[in-house]
Image (cartoon, helix red, strand yellow):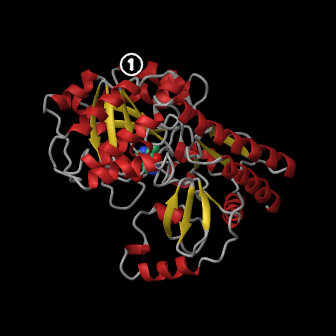
């Protein structure tokens, strides 16, 4: 049960120094640094097994980053490595049609309420692009409504108002569209209309003004990238009704929630069925694969060949097999119930520890994905702007205290914990103890 003491991270530091000479910024994704927090260098992980991950210095952690939720069965689970070993010896990619992609599409159509037809891609960003293309092709309109703070990948299409400051974005009730990065053309920014989350009146006001221009409304049904902000009761239903009434395609970005919050994702959990949905992360069980799926009427734009979508690597036998094996496991109610139960116990431990220490903290989300949010009054957040008021220093200190005790979670206060099915009872007990001690140390 008990974990090894932390023996320093000099190895990670020297790899980062070396990396910066050849790798821009020493990293392969901007989030490799935000997930590290104020720590001066990221940890270099070298191996993982089950719920545990090891860094180059030999420190071992129980992993709740779990590749941003992708390694949902844990690291290197035998069911997956056995299947992949077979594929490795028979060819990993042909760039042709293949059998596992068909079986996988059938599986997704069985599991996901909105899925009548599917297309595959390699990352969440790509699959979001596919869904947006389908919505635009279907409606003949070009604008997309997104919600402030929601994250839909790094591509130009929707990297708008991910993390704007109040100064950039203006009043919370009627925010401006703010590009997330230099290099995003003004025309793209102009095509993205931004709205505050959980605010039906603001939504109706925007829709009344822009409905005829909008191809789609896209959202994260549980906002993983806003510290697992939950939808208010009835809010997803409002989104559904407003989009139906105006002929706007409703897209759920289920890259984080898909197959993790239950076999049918957030749409099954909340009983609100979008027109299109996007999946990645848990879908591949740790291999790069993504999908967009939805109503036949919309996906027919692709089926007819009118709307184009491509990708050399789409649904390779390697990744499609990984996804098939993963979905077979996640289709078992016992597996998702186990994930949920583990998470709920950690959430409960955090709530109790926060209460015992008198520290305001909202423990929000669902078992499979949640966050400890140091809001000023300990109440749950309802939209992005409230996350600008969280105690970031405390959030980072908490993450550091957890790391010292062998628990690895994302340091970015707007991110969340992801639970894998591999956490054992001993590891769960060790996690709850580390959480209690970390709160004590704050
Ligand atoms: N949508 C959501 C909700 C995400 O969390 C992410 C990634 N964190 C993406 C899209 C983009 O996925 P990817 O990083 O695979 O491009």
The residue indicated by pointer 1 is 244
Q: Is residue 336 left or right of residue 307?
A: right
Query: Could you say whether the residue bearing mark 1 is in a helix, strand or loop?
Result: helix
Where the N terminus falls, by quadrant? bottom right
Residue 107 drawn above or below residue 93: above
Mark 1 lies within 8 Å of ligand 1 (Cβ measured)? no
Whether residue 219 appears in this view of the structure is: no
Where the C terminus falls, by quadrant? bottom right
Q: Position of residue 258 (x, y in %)?
A: 45, 36
Q: Position of residue 398 (x, y in %)?
A: 71, 59
How many numbered badges does the structure rendering display?
1
Residue 38 drawn above or below residue 150: below
Q: Position of residue 427 (x, y in %)?
A: 67, 52
Q: Is residue 28 left or right of residue 436?
A: left
Residue depicted at 40% across the width and 27% down the height: 111
Whether residue 231 appears in this view of the structure is: yes
Residue 301 drawn above or below residue 246: below
Is 158 in front, or is 404? 404
Is 417 in front, or is 427? 427
């Amino acid at each position: 049960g008990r974990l090894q003491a932390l023996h320093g991270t000099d190895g990670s530091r020297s790899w980062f120094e070396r990396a910066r000479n050849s790798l821009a910024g020493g990293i392969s994704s901007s989030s490799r640094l935000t997930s590290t927090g104020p720590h001066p260098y990221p940890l270099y992980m070298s191996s993982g097994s089950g719920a545990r991950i090891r860094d180059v210095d030999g420190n071992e952690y129980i992993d709740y980053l779990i590749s941003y939720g992708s390694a949902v069965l844990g690291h290197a689970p035998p069911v997956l490595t056995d299947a992949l070993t077979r594929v490795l010896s028979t060819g990993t990619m042909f760039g042709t049609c293949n059998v596992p992609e068909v079986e996988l599409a059938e599986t997704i159509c069985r599991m996901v309420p909105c899925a009548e037809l599917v297309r595959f891609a390699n990352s969440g960003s790509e699959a979001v692009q596919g869904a947006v293309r389908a919505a635009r092709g279907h409606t003949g309109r070009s604008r997309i409504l997104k919600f402030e703070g929601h994250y839909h990948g790094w591509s130009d299409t929707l990297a708008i108002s991910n993390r704007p400051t109040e100064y950039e974005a203006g009043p919370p009730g009627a925010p401006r569209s703010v590009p997330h990065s230099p290099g995003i053309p003004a025309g793209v920014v102009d095509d993205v209309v931004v709205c505050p989350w959980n605010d039906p009146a603001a939504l109706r006001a925007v829709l009344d003004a822009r409905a005829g221009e909008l191809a789609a409304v896209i959202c994260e049904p549980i906002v993983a990238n806003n510290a697992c902000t939950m939808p208010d009761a009835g809010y997803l239903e409002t989104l559904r009704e407003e989009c139906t009434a105006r002929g706007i395609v409703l897209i759920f970005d289920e890259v984080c929630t898909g197959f993790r919050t239950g076999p049918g994702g957030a749409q099954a959990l909340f009983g609100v069925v979008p027109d299109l949905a996007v999946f990645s992360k848990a879908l591949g069980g740790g291999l790069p694969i993504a999908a967009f799926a939805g109503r036949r009427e919309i996906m027919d734009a692709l089926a007819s060949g009118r709307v184009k979508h491509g990708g050399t690597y789409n649904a390779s036998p390697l990744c499609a097999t990984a996804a098939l094996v993963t979905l077979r496991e996640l289709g078992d109610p016992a597996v998702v119930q186990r994930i949920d139960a583990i998470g709920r116990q950690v959430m409960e431990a955090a709530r109790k520890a926060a209460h015992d220490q008198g520290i305001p903290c909202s423990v929000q989300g669902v078992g499979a994905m949640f966050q400890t949010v140091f809001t000023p009054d300990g109440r749950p957040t309802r939209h992005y702007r409230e996350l600008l008021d969280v105690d970031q220093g405390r959030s980072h200190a908490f993450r550091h205290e957890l790391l010292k005790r062998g628990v690895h979670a994302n340091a970015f206060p707007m991110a969340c914990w992801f639970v894998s099915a591999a956490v054992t009872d001993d590891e769960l007990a060790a996690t709850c103890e580390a959480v209690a001690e970390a709160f004590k140390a704050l």
